[in-house]
Image (cartoon, rainbow, N blue to C red):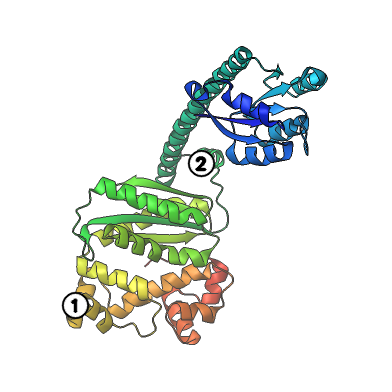
Amino acid sequence: MWKLMIADDEPRIRNGLRKALPWEDKGIEVAAEAENGLEALEIAKIIRPDILFVDINMPLMNGLELIERLQEELPECIIIVITGHDEFLYAQKAVRLSVFDYLLKPVQKSELSAVTDKALQVLSKERIEQKYVHWMNHKLEGSSNYLREEFMRKWLTGKLSDEQIGEELQFFQLLFRETIGLLVVKPLSKISLGSSNKNWDPVLLEFAVKNVMGELLQHFQPSVVFSVGKGMIAAVVQAADIARWMTFHTELELIVKSHFGVGVMICHVLLDDSWEIQDAYLNLLSELNHASALTPIILTAKKYLETYYYKEDLSLSEVAEQLKVDPNYLSKLLKKELGKSFIDCLTDIRIKKAIQYLNDPNPKIYEIAEKVGYNSQHYFSHTFKKITGFSPLEYRKRGDSYES
């Protein structure tokens, strides 16, 4: 139904217009009435009428002032002036204000019906055009999303020239500056967690996780989430808020686990330059493929370490207890599949996390040490240098990357 509003200070005029025609038969609802211009303005803002009958001579705010205000507030509203012969000059001014039409009092039903029908034709045409524009925008948006994802896949796999990359980044408004976050995620449709027994279709699960990632990454702008094949999803973001980036992965895992009852494998890295992204992407894929070959016990153990690395007293016994396996068995399995002892695995994870924190110039070295599970800055610095060849302070100045 189209909404009609009547603004006139004379009750008999409002009543006459309301009863003049079978409005419902025309698909019109008389939605509101007003007896002065100020009241008409406030009500119109709320109900947003499609058609407004307005008298020129009204108290508090006359019809001409009302028309001027409404053309700012409701430019799509069709305004029809109702005026007397003695106000004809005002009506002519109203016409200059681009009102739709005007009728002289006393209003004849035939004239009222004719001008209303003409207004309905305009409204119907505008609505059809709006639907078409909305449809076209939707199609263009969909095409734009597809093209953007296709660009990201080609960029990460080295299929574009430097010139093409620069042009496409500009076109899609993906102007990454400062620290860039890159991650690759693989939902584990075959490993159910908790009480969920749902067997997820891999394509549907990928779609669902991709949507969750998109929602969570809205805080980081610019950001883009896209599928990269084999059930994996990648994201590239402007990771200016490094502290928040460091918690994103845990948040994503928890949401996917609680909503879908499955786990996810996540590999991520922080970069100082977008031109490093291709090598970093290949490294993450390699890391993810290696993780995919792990047994569920080691995969879960690795996840546990990546979640609770910050605990100073994190031990092999604690992880084994959580996995309900013998500590010696877990230790042998870690050595067999990862080629490292429990302590080496934990240290590698802590150093990787520390490197990401070092990308943020704000936290002090002792604060980073505490964040990654060391109660001694000296021991942290000693371990860091042993692994990377540099002290944390030297590393922060160099801005190098570390791969385990």
Amino acid beneath label 2: Ile
Q: Is residue 356 above or below residue 380?
A: above
Residue position marked by numbered label 2 in the rendering: 165
Nearer to us in this view, 255 or 160 = 255
Q: Residues within 10 Å of mark 1 (few under 14, many from 20)?
A: few
The reply to whether dot 1 and dot 2 touch (C-beta < 8 Å) is no
The answer to whether residue 230 is visible is no
Q: Residue at x 75, y 30 (%)?
A: 63
Query: Is 126 placed above or below 280 here?
Result: above
* Residue 17 visible here: yes
Picture residue at 31% right of the left edge, 69% below the top: 303
Q: Secondary structure at mark 2?
A: helix
Tally of numbered discs: 2
Q: Nearer the observer, disc 1 or disc 2?
A: 1
Q: Residue furthest front?
A: 12
From what the image shows, is residue 250 above or below residue 23? below
Percent of width and height locating residue 206: 31, 49
Q: Amino acid at mark 1?
A: Lys
Residue 309 left/right relative to 16: left
Examine the rendered structure and indicate whether residue 178 appears above or below residue 369.
above
Which residue, given by chain and number where applicable, does mark 1 sit on? 324
Q: Nearer the viewer, residue 278 or 323?
A: 323
Q: Quadrant of residue 92?
A: top right
Q: Residue at 46% across / 77% down in the picture? A: 371
- The picture places residue 62, in percent across and down from the top left corner, at 78, 33
Query: What distance separates the C-alpha of mark 1 from that of mark 2?
Result: 49 Å
Q: Which mark is residue 276?
A: none
Q: Position of residue 93 (x, y in %)?
A: 80, 22
Q: Is residue 126 left or right of residue 142?
A: right
Mark 1 element type: loop
- Mark 1 vs 2, N-terminal side: 2
